[in-house]
Image: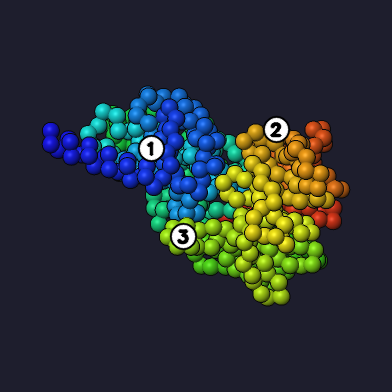
Amino acid sequence: MKRALFLLLICQLVIFCWSNDFYVARSENLVFYFPSSVKDDIADYLDISEEIFREKAVFFNQEKTSPVIVYIDDAIDSRRGEADPFKVNINMNFFFDPKQFTSFETLFAHEMIHILNFRSARKGLSAFDYYLKLGFIPLWVYEGFSEYFSRGDDPFFLYESKKFPFYTSNEMNIFYSRDPYDRAGGYSQSYHMLRSLYKKYDKRLLSLWQDISRSGNIKRYMKENLEPFSSFFEDFKKDLFKPPIKDKDINIITSGIDISGFRIKTGKSYYLDYYDNNRSKKALYKGNKRREFVVKDLHSFCIDDKGVIYFSRLVKKTGNIARYHIFKHVKNKTIKTNMRGIYPDIEGNLLTTSDGHGNILLYDINRPDRPIKRFKGFFSKIKDKTLYFFNTSESYLSRFFIDNDKVQTRLITYDKTGFDIIFIAGKPYIDIYENGKFFLKSENADEKIEYPGGNDIFYHNQRLYFRMLSPGSSSVVCK
């Protein structure tokens, strides 16, 4: 009895400490603890999280149990998400980049699926048996379930995954310990492997976690219900890594490890690529066949009509706090500004960014201390004093006339997008996926232009620039 009272007191102290330093928000199945820095944004995300929990609980045949505790931090450079198999709670970083396939919805669903699977595996087992049987589960199975069932069949993610090499079964068991590029590749291959299994076995695959709590050994389960590991890896490799289709109308502009953000400004090509051996940090380069280094350690960039570069870089402060700030690079000098965010775009004295919390920030570069406008959304472009941005919660592109100060209007709807905005003959287009093909779509619903695929596209002088990906490399091509 004394031990029980002591444990209860400890629990109360822990809850009090978190409650004292953090805000608390509750729904029927979730309890969120979060810092004051995100309190203005958290309400919408709690509602979204509750919907995700209910949907996944039904899908995985999960019985109602105690609420899931979710701890939110705002450190950016901390680990993005983690589900604890022992405490059965979630730790999440509150910074999201849907253009890099880490929206709030996919990240939360990923961690919640871990929790639901852990609960299924624990059912009817002692703590010792539960921990022991978790040790028999390969890493790609853990992550594959969460990756695939949080994303579904995302065509843009499928296209992006072509850049990673194939990993053997032994490599897939330890990809956590590899460099950031190979770790991302491990997650990607886990997604593909579970996707392949689910399309072939459907309900039998979903019984895997429940079976662990009954008979235990996952290798035995696969041998009896699905197929042996060794043959599955070989079949999967043959299916996924098919030779790329060659097109005589495609011209290669430049190649690298993982090129992104390609732009042409003042007659010069600019793009990002890895510069370090760990493939974790990117630098800005200019030139095509012969690249020239410009600046390193940046997330994204834009260039004004005079050739001045504005880029986003992570700035660490005291403690765990870090923020993306906009820097100005001109005449080989780099100057930190008070503007914040990622994916900057500039026209005249107006600069727009995304803050990573689901907001668009519009700045006047002559008064950079605070945004002049703020909108709910992600990824934005400015064209002719008009702001275009994605409303991610309702799946449409919005338009806002900056000088007229009118209410934003709905412009282009979508189901699947890569979050790109380009302008052809002055009209905005976004990249979408419909009926098995990639298209550029305008506000005219019937006006669609097919293109080879993927996100991170660019249009210039009647040519579309996009990326062709193969294991370990990428190329910017135009058509």
The residue lying toward the viewer, choosing from 231 and 192, is 192
The tag earlier along the polypeptide, 1 or 3, is: 1
The residue lying toward the viewer, choosing from 152 and 33, is 33
Q: Position of residue 221 (x, y in %)?
A: 35, 33
Tell me if label 1 and label 3 are in contact, CB under 8 Å: no
132 shown above or below 54 = below
Q: What is the CA distance from the residue labelled 1 to the residue labelled 2?
A: 39 Å
Pointer 3: what residue? 179
User: On the image, which quarter does residue 130 sit in?
Assistant: top left
User: On the image, which quarter does residue 256 sit in?
Assistant: bottom right
The residue lying toward the viewer, choosing from 112 and 451, is 112
Q: Secondary structure at mark 2?
A: loop
Q: Nearer the viewer, mark 3 or mark 2?
A: 3
Write the residue at 60% across / 50% down: 355
Name the side, left or right, on which 100 lies relative to 139. Answer: right
| Visible residue check, residue 77 | no
Pointer 1: what residue? 69
Q: Secondary structure at mark 1?
A: strand
221 shown above or below 377 = above
| Quadrant holding the N terminus | top left
Write the residue at 50% across / 62% down: 316
139 shown above or below 220 = below
Q: Position of residue 129 (x, y in %)?
A: 23, 37
Task: Indicate the amino acid at tag 2.
Answer: Asn
The residue lying toward the viewer, choosing from 35 and 112, is 35
